[in-house]
Amino acid sequence: MAYRSSTSGMWVPGVKKAQMSDRGEEQLPPVVSVSSLPIEVREKEILYAVETSSVVILAGETGSGKTTQTPQYLYRAKFGKIAVTQPRRIAAITVAERVASEMGVRLGGEVQSNSPLRFEEKWDPERTGIKFLTDGMLVRETMLDPLLSHYNVIMLDEAHERNLETDILLGLIKKILKRRPDLRVVRTIVASATLHVESFVRFFSSVKHDANVKQPVVSIAVQGRQFPVDVLYLQEPAANFEQKAIDTVLAIHEREAPVIVATTIAETSVTIPGVVYVVDSCFVKLPFYNPLTGIEALVTTVESKAAAKQRAGRAGRMRKCFRLVTEATYRKSFQKHTIPQIQRTNLAPIVLHLLSMGIQDIVHFDFLSPPTPEALIRALEVLYVCPYWYSLGAISKDCQLVEPLGAHMAEFPVDPFMSKMLLSSFEFGYDLLKELEIAKQRHVCRCTEEALTIASMLSEFLENDLSRSWCDEHCLHHRILMRATEIRKQLHRTIKDGRIVHVHPTSVLNSFIRSPEWVLYHQSVLTDKEYVREISR
């Protein structure tokens, strides 16, 4: 079925070009009930696989119900405590709310979500049966409980994204299975819509499993959407992708409203209700870390075929997906899977975390996709104790955490540079309260010290009893400040290379005629230039 607007230039491969009907068929179909989800007929098969295997690879297409229904199957079958990870915080919260609603229970009881997400740590292990959390938070839990003894089943959802924390968890879970193959206490489910099943099966097949296990690793494929999705491509390459996206959206908008502009957050577990069309630019911004320069660049690149499939099937009741590339470009130039984050990120936090767990042989740690040697060497250099170049001094020559600095740095769920700064502030006798008092006397904003400005705003927020009206008066976001307050509580509990950089356009330092002689910055971002953010001078 072709797109009716002459501005689109889109077509469905193998389908004769024709006008699209404007009749009632364009109305949204009724919302799908739980009983009609494709995964429902596979419930017994999934439960049997989890009972008789150590690892289950669940490849469920978008709309199959794998994310919301699988945890409920396990809970009803009394498999014990279940941990379900999501790559993003909003996805973990949204899925937990949906599951709690379907189970008819209050969120925070049998089903838990918002409390255990990264900085917030409250949950009742006696009461909670299903715990939704970010993969990063589960990684943090392994520091206190390396064998994850609190859980009987661990489900890694959206594993196809190959987040940094997901890859770490895969390696840690494989290590747990090796440590106690006879117990089989922890059963693992790796779930995704676009999973590279063979690589996961090979990864876990090398583990020595319990002799009573009938089949150590089982893979199950579940069909997805119940409504067909037509994928349309450009007839000719677009000179301006932004304009082509706008033209396509406006042409659809002549009959359909509203238009939702979304980031990659809409690619995973969060399904936006009522969506009929998806316009896919086929581009994505990914961070790439250069170990030679220490710069993390946010690079715009083409998406993978796996990501494109996710975008096309994001809403279960969708009719059409418009990809703003030609079919030939898609088939020849797009990679099958996105480059794993562990192969394009700063490894210093990973090294610090693994060392804190007593894993000293970082080089031979069992990653699904090993990181580059250059990135690993750079991470060790940054953390190493060396008087000849700048380093954080967190690990010794024999790859041990330096006590107490290294151990304390590993406890902070922040970048090692930030944790070192917080710990060093005590050594240098830095008085934050005094600095904040000076900032308040200058009407909150210290225009040359953005970090202190943020800290001052947070201090004022606390003094005004977390007032929403105070936030409205000062044009501040109440929810963000509440989140910052929780982060502040946990941090309190835990407690020169010649490059040319530019002040970020959003920085208040841009209002000054003369550039400062020096600045302290927290983040460096490479786009068209290398910019620094969160600056103090």
Image (cartoon, rainbow, N blue to C red):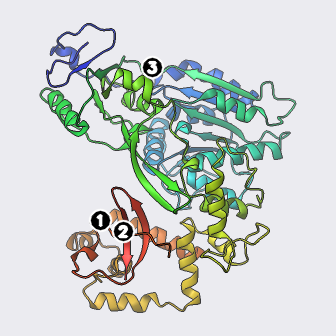
**In whole angstroms, how far apart are the C-alphas of marks 3 and 1?**
41 Å
Picture coordinates of residue 111 (x, y %)?
Answer: 53, 46
Please give the residue where the numbered disc 2 appears in the rendered image: 481
Residue under pointer 3: 36
Q: Amino acid at mark 2?
A: Leu
Earlier-in-chain disc, 3 versus 2: 3
Q: Nearer the viewer, mark 3 or mark 2?
A: 2
Name the foreground residue: 6 vs 527. 527
Q: Residues within 10 Å of mark 1 (few under 14, many from 20)?
A: few
Residue 74 quadrant? top right
The type of residue carrying mark 1 is His
Q: Marks 3/2: CA distance?
A: 42 Å
Which residue is depicted at the point 21% across and 33% down?
244
Q: Amino acid at mark 3?
A: Ser
Instruction: Residue 54: tell me if it is visible.
Output: no
Q: Quadrant of the N terminus?
A: top left
Q: Quadrant of residue 340?
A: top right
Q: Is residue 470 above or below residue 204?
A: below
User: Measured from the top left, where is residue 145 in percent x and y?
Assistant: 72, 57
The local secondary structure at tag 1 comes to loop
Q: Which mark is residue 28?
A: none
Q: Which residue is mark 1?
A: 477
Say whether residue 127 is left or right of residue 365: left
Which corner quadrant of the image does residue 531 belong to?
A: bottom left
Q: Are marks 1 and 2 in contact (CB under 8 Å)?
A: yes
